[in-house]
Image: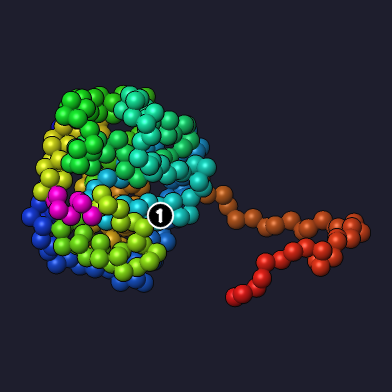
């Protein structure tokens, strides 16, 4: 088993106190992000050309920045090749299925990468803490999950797992910011708010989960996420390092001249209904 336990991020997460951490300026951040996104495009083309199957799991504390990191990864990528799986709460029918069944259908085919914005680890996290699963279901998950992931790896899937770690003070700051920002308020669910009072329970659930699922074939990689910009850059750089790739970017080329319209006369623009130009 690969030991991924308490680094600076998880240590702060355990005791709830934030240590002063170096931030990164907007200009430097945007420059580095732009360079990394170019590399992500190269990686995407390599995945397509080599018919690779890649799964990247994003887990961690509420408001730790998983969604923002996923957005920066996918921003310049082809959604037909790189997909995001962010599943809602299971339906009544899904609750009667084999637990992993609803996730299996979202796994990549050859030439695809899927980013899971939360995953089957819901059972070891929110379901465990909030009592949404039974003790037997939880214990069965801990038994099955390592074997399930080993099976995925044996099938040829590249499985990469990230845990976003933040301290209690930073989580609280982000919660308050979301409340004040109309475009972010939807991110705060009743479950998120309940998690504030269950910090220790979530810590215990995470530690128990790591003890069983931090396996050699698919180890956990911990992200110190107290500084969002640094976390995003570090995750993307690490993801790029996990899959050796070559530059398959096509060379620049000249556009050929447009063909002559051949005397075709288009209908007048007055026949079309345009939207009002408010801006």
Where, by quadrant of the figure, is residue 133 drawn? top left
Report the coloring of the rendering: rainbow
Q: Residue at x 24, y 25 (%)?
A: 144
- Relative depth, front residue between 244 and 271: 271
Q: Position of residue 215 (x, y in %)?
A: 20, 32
Q: Residue furthest left?
A: 15
Res. 172 in view: yes
Q: Residue at x 10, y 48 (%)?
A: 200
Where, by quadrant of the figure, is residue 160 drawn? top left
Dominant secondary structure of the residues highlighted in magenta in the image: helix
Identify the magenta region.
193-199
Q: Is residue 269 left or right of residue 141?
A: right
- Which residue bears the numbered disc 1? 71
Q: Position of residue 238 (x, y in %)?
A: 30, 49
Q: Residue furthest bottom?
A: 279
Is 196 contained in the magenta span?
yes
Q: Position of residue 225 (x, y in %)?
A: 23, 56
Q: Position of residue 74 (x, y in %)?
A: 44, 51
User: Please, is residue 230 above or below residue 25 in the view?
Assistant: above
- Relative depth, front residue between 279 and 196: 196
For the image, the number of numbered tags is 1
| Label 1 crowd bin: few (<14), some (14–19), many (20+), radius 10 Å | few
User: Please, is residue 246 above or below residue 31 in the view?
Assistant: above
Quarter of the C terminus within the rendering: bottom right
User: Please, is residue 54 above or below residue 278 in the view?
Assistant: above
Q: Residue at x 20, y 42 (%)?
A: 130
- Relative depth, front residue between 148 and 278: 278
Element assignment for label 1: helix
Q: Residue at x 38, y 41 (%)?
A: 87
């Amino acid at each position: 088993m690969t030991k991924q336990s308490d680094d600076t991020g998880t240590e702060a997460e355990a005791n709830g106190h934030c240590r002063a951490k170096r931030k990164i300026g907007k200009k430097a951040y945007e420059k580095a992000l732009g360079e990394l996104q170019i590399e992500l495009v190269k990686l995407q083309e390599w995945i397509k050309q080599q018919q690779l199957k890649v799964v990247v799991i994003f887990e961690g504390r509420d408001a730790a920045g998983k969604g923002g990191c996923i957005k920066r990864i996918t921003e310049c990528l082809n959604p037909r090749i790189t997909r995001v799986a962010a599943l809602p709460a299971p339906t009544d029918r899904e609750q009667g299925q084999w637990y992993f069944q609803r996730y299996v259908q979202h796994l990549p085919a050859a030439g695809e990468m899927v980013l899971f914005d939360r995953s089957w680890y819901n059972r070891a996290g929110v379901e465990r803490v909030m009592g949404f699963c039974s003790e037997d279901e939880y214990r069965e998950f801990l038994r099955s999950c390592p074997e399930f992931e080993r099976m995925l790896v044996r099938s040829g899937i590249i499985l990469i797992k990230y845990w976003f770690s933040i301290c209690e003070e930073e989580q609280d700051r982000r919660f308050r910011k979301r409340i004040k920002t109309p475009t972010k308020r939807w991110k705060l669910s009743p479950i998120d708010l309940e998690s504030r009072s269950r910090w220790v329970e979530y810590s215990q659930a995470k530690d128990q989960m790591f003890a069983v699922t931090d396996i050699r074939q698919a180890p956990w990689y911990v992200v110190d996420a107290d500084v969002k910009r640094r976390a995003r850059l570090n995750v993307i750089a690490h993801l790029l390092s996990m899959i050796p790739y070559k530059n398959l970017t096509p060379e620049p080329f000249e556009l050929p001249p447009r063909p002559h319209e051949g005397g075709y006369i288009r209908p007048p623009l007055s026949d079309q209904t345009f939207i009002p130009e408010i801006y």
